[in-house]
Amino acid sequence: MNKINRVIAGATGLLAVGAAVVGCSDTSADTPDGQPADKPAASATDTKVSSGSNAQVKVDGSDLAGLDLNSVTCVKQGGKINVASAAIGGQQGLGVVMTDEATPKVESLGLVYDGSALAVSEAMGAKVGSAEVAVDGDTYTITGEASGADMKNPMAGMISKPFTITVSCS
């Protein structure tokens, strides 16, 4: 059983990092407009970015400690909505990837809460946590329960925390 807990803890941590990295990925390249040299430049209407985003992030009923809400950015591009923040205390911050459709679905979510890497994802038949998205104009409210392991004590087993993320994304 301890071996399974270590595998789950490691996988959950990787999911949280992956969500944050996807949300914050650098697309710099050789061309002046930041597009890869082998792809044509996208038009201004293809990507929509919102900074500051009037964000609110609560985990277990409290504001997510250390998160600079002004650093939360929302990017709509290529049928996806990516929400990301600056780092929390040198660790990964908030990262969310959703589909950009009438009823968005969370594909992955990662955050750090009190030393725990928490995630929501569904890949290769393994589901971690849960999330629902409500849309009101340009405001997205993501609620659910993120699961993970206490990275200070990964052998303690899985933990789950309820969360609410509200962000404006135009």
Image (cartoon, rainbow, N blue to C red):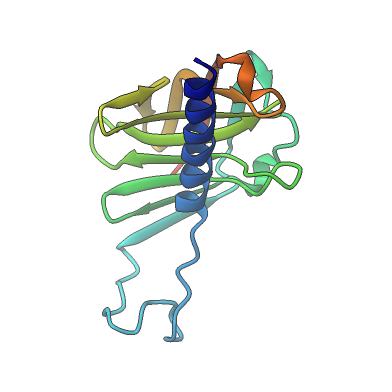
- Residue name at image x 27 percent, y 78 percent: 39
Residue 114 at what x, y percent from top left?
71, 25
Q: Nearer the viewer, residue 78 or 110?
A: 110
- Residue name at image x 48 percent, y 30 percent: 7
Q: Is residue 61 left or right of residue 7?
A: right
- Residue name at image x 30 percent, y 62 percent: 46
- Visible in this render: residue 132? no
Residue 138 at what x, y percent from top left?
40, 38
Q: Is residue 64 above or below residue 62?
A: below
- Visible in this render: residue 151? yes
Q: Nearer the viewer, residue 150 or 131?
A: 150
The answer to which quarter of the image holds residue 153 is: top right
Residue 23 at what x, y percent from top left?
47, 50
Q: Nearer the viewer, residue 119 or 24?
A: 119
- Residue name at image x 50 percent, y 65 percent: 26
Q: Say how many tags the image has.
A: 0
Q: Is residue 141 left or right of residue 9?
A: left
The answer to which quarter of the image holds residue 34 is: bottom left
Q: Nearer the viewer, residue 126 or 29?
A: 126
Q: Is residue 139 above or below residue 52?
A: above
Q: Is residue 26 above or below residue 63?
A: below
Residue 159 at what x, y percent from top left?
57, 15
